[in-house]
Amino acid sequence: MSLFKRLYRWVDLRVGIGEIADKELTGYLLPRNINAWYSLGSVLMVAFAIQVVTGMLLLVYYVPDAEKAFKSVNFIMNEVPFGWLIRLCHAVGSNTMIAALILHMLSTLVMGSYKSPRELNWLSGFLLFTLVQGISLTGYLAPWSQLSFWATTVATNSVSALPVAGPGMVEFLRGGKLVGPATLGRFFALHVAFLPLVISVVIVVHIFLLKRTGISAPPFGRSDTKTPWQAERYRYQSHPGGIPFFPNYMLEDTTSICIYLAIFLGVVFFWPSMPFTPDAFVPADPFKTPAHIKPEWYFLANYQTLKIFPNELLGLTVQGAAMTLLALLPFADRSPERHPLKRPLFLALVVGGILLWIALSVWGHLS
Ligand code: HEM
């Protein structure tokens, strides 16, 4: 017996690795009509892991000090061997991860997998959605460029429109009246310590909930579930006769991860300027307001909404109401029907919402 096999047997005898693999890999059965959209969750875990690893590598040379941050990022880009690659992967990765996040959210929306008994899966996912936006926003300040400085000034300014607590909240966020060195310290702490930890914990909760409810069967094709879910008692949704996670669905997950990596690396190598505007190459100057400061593409619709309304509070209220409605969707939409074509009103609302979001983003980009 080879040394490796003997080592495996020794550990297996004590930990039962074989039993875990039987239960969680070959014995973990998924709906036989499962589709590729279900692999986006795994894509997101890989995308998050890439952000964590590249972020840790950037920390080796990045200096979170208003005097030194911009120079340290330039040093990473120009002097550190492959520093440019790590930095570009981190900057592009935040964009591609958000794109994958939006697709994952949309797929669970269209397939109705947010419905009972998966309300908590949806809520934990929605929390991840806001936390990932938060980690992107706080990371944007790190290079301490004109783009970082003024985008953060605009983003934090909008909070001041909230009645009573607004101005105090802005001051708390910024660590002073204006964006300055204290803001960099706060955002840096949120970006590298607090938010990655909280996101990791919420991902674990999200997966735990998935393991407790069991994965939903897609509303298309020949389903294996005949009995509807009963609210009276807890029941794990199993899929007898379904396909094993390993090797079958892991192959699908791997394919989607490879497609994600191809797109992500395609942007890194062939469109490296994607996450940057010319202001990203100029150090922050609090006395020089650039002519056009725009947030990243995924915040453009929010930015434009604030501009449309005559007062900022109204814009913030509309956005807050839309977000609350989306978060509480499983409690508002209680019909058990999940097939999108059998929910025409809902489908029309989703398509209308997507078109509105695209229109506002394009408008925000061009304005
Ligand atoms: C870092 C972010 C996220 C990660 C790593 C993640 C991961 C996963 C994984 C691995 C699954 C199981 C396989 C699948 O259906 O894809 C899943 C399912 C699910 N996710 Fe997420 N997710 C994230 C964000 C979100 C967001 C933003 C939402 C919606 C607001 C969401 C809602 C759901 C729902 C409802 C399911 C259950 C699907 C079903 O059983 O059919 N997730 N997620």
Image (tube, helix red, strand yellow):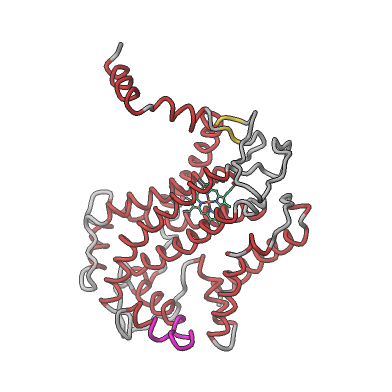
Expressed as whole percent of the image width and height from the top left, the position of residue 64 reads: 24, 67
Please tell me which residue is depicted at 49% across the width and 61% down the height of the picture.
127
Q: In this view, does 282 lie to the left or right of 18?
A: left
Expressed as whole percent of the image width and height from the top left, the position of residue 62 reads: 24, 61
**Quarter occupied by the N terminus:** top left
Please tell me which residue is depicted at 32% across the width and 22% down the height of the picture.
8
Q: Which of 279 and 26 is in front in this view?
A: 26
Q: In this view, does 107 lie above or below 188?
A: above
Is 295 within the magenta? no
Q: In this view, does 244 lie above or below 258?
A: above
Is 159 within the magenta? yes
Expressed as whole percent of the image width and height from the top left, the position of residue 176 reads: 30, 83
Which image quadrant is residue 157 in? bottom left
**Quarter occupied by the C terminus:** bottom right
Residue at the top extreme of this rendering: 1
Q: Is residue 156 above or below residue 6?
A: below
The tally of labels here is 0
Q: In this view, does 24 lie to the left or right of 278?
A: right
Q: In this view, does 358 lie to the left or right of 55?
A: right
Q: Which of 127 and 331 is in front in this view?
A: 331
Expressed as whole percent of the image width and height from the top left, the position of residue 121 reads: 55, 53
Q: Magenta region: which residues? A: 158-169
Residue at the front extreme of this rendering: 232
Please tell me which residue is depicted at 40% across the width and 86% down the height of the picture.
167
